[in-house]
Image (cartoon, grey):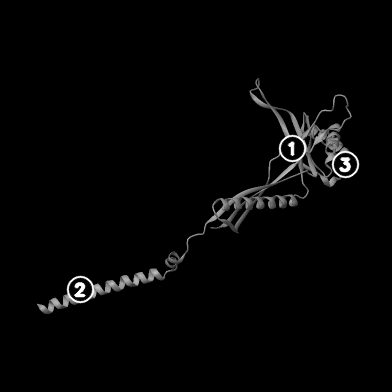
């Protein structure tokens, strides 16, 4: 009986010892893992300042592109296309006569479509004829020629000005200047924020750039001649372009 009790006590002590060794081993493995070590030794994140800012540059455009069209109608597609080709050829010749090279003129759209209507008597859709549209884009490197190009096109058969846009041949310098101003503005605001918080601005930690051009109003130009001067050219106002660059910065904060 006593021997049996002694064996039972030994087995119980052995089980407790084995469980203790297992718990100790498990804790050792957890403590030795990289994530546990990082959680124990990683210092708190230092305070930071995040600032977004914009930089703008207003500049005059140095080129224009004009979309000019000829639309014709006829009973058949063949007749409408022939009339359109004749008028568009006259338009192109007039534009080239102004010194615009052929390489600066590109066809952007050519379409032939039936003109349909609903016949109430027949109770069906009928075709009354065909419409042909031909639009070309003229790239003008001298903006003051824009009015003359429009006038020449309208006088020789064009009956549609589909668009007039002003651009920069090389916007890179303007964007770089806008970026410089954006970063400088972000630094100034970060310095003010750091001082207001009772510290000073540290080094730049991160900088992201978002470059874009602001929408601009359509250029203004008169389609009709002046009442007292039928020979006056179409006046065109080019306006200005605004190049804007946005940045987001992250700085360290020194307390």
Which of discs 1 and 2 lies nearer the camera? The answer is 2
> Which numbered circle lies on residue 111?
1
**Marks 3 and 2: CB-CB under 8 Å?**
no
Q: Which residue is mark 2?
A: 12
Give the residue at x 37% y 71%.
Answer: 28
Please tell me which of labels 1 and 2 falls first in the chain.
Answer: 2
Along the viewing direction, whichever of 182 and 164 lies nearer the viewer? 182
User: In the drawing, does residue 77 fall left or right of residue 195?
Assistant: right
Q: Position of residue 129 (x, y in %)?
A: 74, 29
User: In the drawing, does residue 58 fall left or right of residue 142?
Assistant: left
**Marks 1 and 2: CB-CB under 8 Å?**
no
Q: Residues within 10 Å of mark 3 (few under 14, many from 20)?
A: some
Image quarter in which the N terminus is found: bottom left
Q: Which residue is mark 3?
A: 96
Q: Position of residue 160 (x, y in %)?
A: 78, 33
In space, the residues marked 3 and 1 are separated at their CA atoms by 24 Å
In space, the residues marked 1 and 2 are separated at their CA atoms by 96 Å
Which of discs 3 and 2 lies nearer the camera? The answer is 2
Q: Is residue 218 above or below residue 204?
A: above
Say which element carries label 2.
helix
Q: Is residue 244 above or below residue 233?
A: below
> Which numbered circle lies on residue 101?
none
Along the viewing direction, whichever of 187 and 104 lies nearer the viewer? 187
């Amino acid at each position: 009986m006593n021997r049996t009790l002694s064996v039972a006590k030994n087995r119980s002590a052995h089980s407790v010892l084995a469980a203790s060794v297992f718990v100790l081993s498990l804790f050792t493995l957890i403590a030795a893992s990289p994530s546990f070590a990082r959680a124990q030794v990683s210092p708190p994140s230092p305070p930071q300042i995040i600032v977004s800012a914009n930089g703008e540059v207003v500049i005059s455009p140095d080129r224009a592109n004009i979309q000019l069209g000829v639309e014709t109608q006829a009973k058949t597609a063949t007749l409408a296309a022939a009339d359109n080709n004749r008028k568009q050829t006259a338009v192109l010749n007039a534009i080239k006569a102004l010194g615009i090279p052929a390489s600066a003129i590109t066809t952007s759209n050519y379409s032939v479509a039936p003109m349909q209507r609903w016949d109430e008597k027949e109770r069906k859709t009928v075709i009354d004829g065909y419409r042909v549209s031909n639009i070309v884009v003229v790239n003008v490197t001298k903006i003051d020629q824009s009015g003359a190009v429009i006038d020449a096109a309208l006088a020789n058969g064009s009956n549609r000005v589909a668009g007039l846009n002003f651009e920069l041949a090389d916007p890179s310098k303007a964007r770089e200047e806008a970026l410089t101003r954006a970063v400088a503005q972000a630094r100034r605001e970060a310095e003010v924020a750091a001082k207001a918080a009772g510290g000073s601005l540290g080094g730049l930690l991160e900088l992201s750039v978002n470059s874009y051009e602001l929408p601009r109003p359509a250029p203004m130009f008169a389609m009709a001649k002046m009442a007292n001067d039928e020979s006056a050219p179409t006046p065109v106002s080019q306006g200005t372009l605004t190049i804007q660059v946005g940045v987001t910065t992250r700085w360290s904060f020194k307390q």
